[in-house]
Image (cartoon, coloured by chain):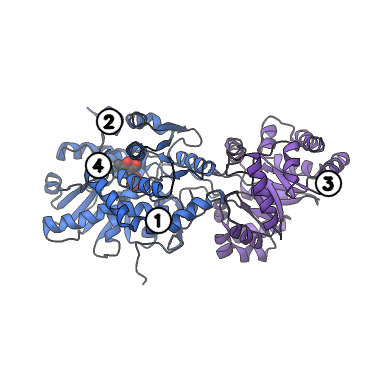
Chain colours: A blue, B purple
């Protein structure tokens, strides 16, 4: 049996998934990134600058919090990796800062991004404000409505928020618009993709900027428990960046069980879902080969999730590979279950989670745990942005 | 009809016009009527767009025609059925579109049916030459299907040469780094310099220029350097306004011929 690897091949494939299916108009930019990203990121000056920012601007390392109340309820050991305590409120800033330093070294002066929940948009707008770069964020019209506070934050940070009005008016369409912008402004623009999706090298590039989550988990567990390896790591998967970051260090450690939670929407077979591994087939979306929710005729299906950050009809190629090789177990959680978990965690632990994170939390009570288990949940973001969705459920 | 045909070729003096349209647009049964009208008008190359939900290299007009065609019920399955009924044509037919629907359809089956309905070749913008050579070339060659690749002002000399070697249909020079139907940021001088260089590098294939060519005059301009030009968005805009695709198509080509001549 071949070993499941955490790194892609030189041409960006994880098993059969990945690659760079891009039109020639993006070839120059994508190959420039492919040829230079590893080297640039490895430069000591890059590492120092990024680490300083992560420490003093973002507030890393984020705590690994022993969730004692939840642990007691479930009779096991639950830890939250507190990415919600990152500056701007989610893990997305790790990637946005890494990519902005990369963009500067590539000589790019204009930054574009897509966003679903608005967290990646806010993170990118923040990084651009910090470095004085022009910032344009594409966001689905529907998401602009349901994540209004983040839209206001992006504007206050100086970004231009452009509504994507085609298709389902959500993350998929915002990504299409960002790609079209990049094609049109290829020479001066860097596209900061917000998840481990897109053409090679983005899945690996974004993973490299998020893998600090798993590295810190290892160090912190070692300090706090005397053992570096958890038994389980749980993360929600939209495109899969917080999951990739939390999993990366453990992928080649077979004793660690990796648990991915997708958005079930109103139920996997309700026709209103975003559970890509359950509903998808092999295809190409946004420049890489992965699992894609699509019709038999190859038209991409508009997904549904109450959580804007998980409302995407694909997953990163790394996750398609972890699914196919069964290295990770995939579950899904409905809108209602996610809302319930958000309220339960808020009351039990005093932490309001993002709706995306609530999906990861919801799986805790659906699975059975041993008292000796050490379960780390990637607490990808905080719930302030989701108050408008939560409020109607306040009784 | 004969008149139209001879007026286009007379105007263009051996240069080629390629016309793009989206299959199943404006209505699902338009496909065959449009092809026959373009053929009758003497258009040498017809690019039949295979609709896709997420056409990232296309501007709003072609995006809209893709979505409308899908809504009209257009599928690859149906497209091959429509093409089966075509009489013999003078025009060369190319299928243009994104790789995902072809993957779902099955590459082998796609090529079999394409060959059987008389398709000359394919233009698949999101299938780069490297990935084509690695996994698709043997199948395409087995069924005698030609392949077209794009170049842009950013494509390097080495790469243009590689693309010319791999391409078997023609080389599609995108006039500016942009999406379809949108004028790029490049000046007329920059475009001219780029085309002049491309023309010296593309030696095996014809060099056809596309993106943003809307009139016979603009077509004439690129044909001063290249072997031909490609018109898409401007034609789709006209088709979007009509129920009589036959006369719209005939008139459109006539206007192109007249504009070219002036
Ligand atoms: C808090 C939070 N968690 C998770 C996600 C999902 O993204 P990914 O799967 O890339 O981590 C988002 C996306 O917006 C988010 O804001």
Q: Which of marks 4 and 1 is nearer the N terminus?
A: 1
- Residue A38 % position (x, y): 38, 58
Q: Does the residue labelled 4 lie within 8 Å of ligand 1?
A: no
Q: Give the CA separation, mark 4 to mark 1.
A: 23 Å
Residue topped by disc 1: A37
- Residue B190 % position (x, y): 63, 43
Q: Front-most of A107 and A382?
A: A107
Residue positioned 47% across, 39% down in the render: A173
The chain holding disc 4 is A
Residue topped by disc 2: A387
Q: In which quarter of the image is residue A353?
A: top left
The chain holding disc 1 is A
Residue positioned 20% across, 61% down in the render: A229
Relative horizontal placement of residue A132, taking residue A87 as reference (left or right): right
In front: mark 3 or mark 2?
Answer: 3
- Image quadrant holding the C terminus of chain A, namely top left
Relative horizontal placement of residue B171, taking residue A60 as reference (left or right): right
Q: Does the residue labelled 3 lie within 8 Å of ligand 1?
A: no
Q: Front-most of A59 and A291?
A: A59
Residue topped by disc 3: B13
- Residue A292 % position (x, y): 46, 50
Disc 1 is placed on an element classified as helix
């Amino acid at each position: 049996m071949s070993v499941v690897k955490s790194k892609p091949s030189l041409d960006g494939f994880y098993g059969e998934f990945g690659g760079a299916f891009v039109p020639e108009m993006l070839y120059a930019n994508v190959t420039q990134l492919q040829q230079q990203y590893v080297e640039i990121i490895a430069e000591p000056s890059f590492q120092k600058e990024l680490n300083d920012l992560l420490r003093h601007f973002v507030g890393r390392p984020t705590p690994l919090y022993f969730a004692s109340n939840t642990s007691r309820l479930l009779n096991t050991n639950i830890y939250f990796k507190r990415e919600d305590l990152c500056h701007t409120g989610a893990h997305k800033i790790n990637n946005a800062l890494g990519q902005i330093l990369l963009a500067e070294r590539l000589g790019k002066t204009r930054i574009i991004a897509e966003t679903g929940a608005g967290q990646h948009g806010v993170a990118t707008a923040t990084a651009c404000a910090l470095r004085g770069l022009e910032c344009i964020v594409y966001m689905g019209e529907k998401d602009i409505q349901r994540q209004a506070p983040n839209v206001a934050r992006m504007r206050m940070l100086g970004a231009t928020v452009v509504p994507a009005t085609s298709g389902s008016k959500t993350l998929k369409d915002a990504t299409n618009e960002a790609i079209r912008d990049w094609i049109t402004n290829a020479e001066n623009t860097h596209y900061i993709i917000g998840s481990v999706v897109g053409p090679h090298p983005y899945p690996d590039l974004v993973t490299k900027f998020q893998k600090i989550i798993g590295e810190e988990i290892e160090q912190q567990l070692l300090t706090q428990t005397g053992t570096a390896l958890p038994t389980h790591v749980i993360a929600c998967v939209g495109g899969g960046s917080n999951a990739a970051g939390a999993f990366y260090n453990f992928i080649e450690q077979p004793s660690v069980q990796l648990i991915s939670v997708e958005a079930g929407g109103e139920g996997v077979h309700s026709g209103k879902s975003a559970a890509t591994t359950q509903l998808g087939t092999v295809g190409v979306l946004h420049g890489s080969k992965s699992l894609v929710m699509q019709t038999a005729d190859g038209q991409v299906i508009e997904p549904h999730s109450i959580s804007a950050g998980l409302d995407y009809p694909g997953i990163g190629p790394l996750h398609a590979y972890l699914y196919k090789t069964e290295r990770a177990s995939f579950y899904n959680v409905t809108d209602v279950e996610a809302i319930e978990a958000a309220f339960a965690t808020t009351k039990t632990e005093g932490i309001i989670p993002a709706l995306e994170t609530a999906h990861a939390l919801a799986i805790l009570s659906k699975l059975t745990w041993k008292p000796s288990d050490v379960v780390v949940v990637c607490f990808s973001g905080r719930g302030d942005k989701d108050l408008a969705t939560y409020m109607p459920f306040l009784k | 009809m004969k008149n139209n045909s001879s007026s286009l070729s007379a105007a263009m003096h051996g240069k080629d016009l390629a016309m793009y349209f989206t299959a199943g647009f404006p209505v699902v049964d338009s496909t065959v009527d449009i092809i026959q009208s373009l053929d009758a008008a003497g258009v040498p190359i017809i690019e039949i767009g295979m609709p896709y939900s997420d056409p990232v290299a296309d501007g709003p007009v072609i995006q809209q025609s893709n979505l409308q065609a899908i809504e009209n019920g257009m599928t690859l399955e149906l497209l091959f059925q429509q093409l089966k009924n075509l009489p013999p044509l003078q025009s060369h037919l190319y299928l243009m579109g994104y790789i995902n629907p072809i993957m779902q359809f099955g590459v082998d089956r796609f090529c079999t049916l394409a060959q059987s309905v008389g398709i000359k070749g394919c233009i698949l913008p999101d299938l780069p030459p490297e990935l084509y050579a690695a996994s698709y070339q043997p199948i395409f060659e087995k069924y005698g299907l030609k392949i077209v690749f794009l170049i842009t002002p950013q494509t390097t000399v080495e790469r243009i040469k590689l693309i010319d070697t791999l391409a078997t249909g023609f080389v599609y020079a995108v006039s500016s780094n942009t999406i379809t139907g949108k004028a790029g940021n490049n000046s007329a001088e920059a475009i001219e310099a780029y085309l002049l260089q491309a023309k010296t590098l593309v030696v095996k294939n014809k060099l056809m220029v596309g993106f943003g060519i809307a009139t016979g005059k603009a077509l004439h301009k690129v044909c001063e350097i290249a072997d031909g030009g490609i018109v898409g968005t401007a034609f789709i805009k006209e088709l979007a306004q009509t129920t009589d695709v036959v006369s719209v198509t005939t008139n459109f080509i006539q206007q192109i011929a007249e504009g070219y001549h002036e």
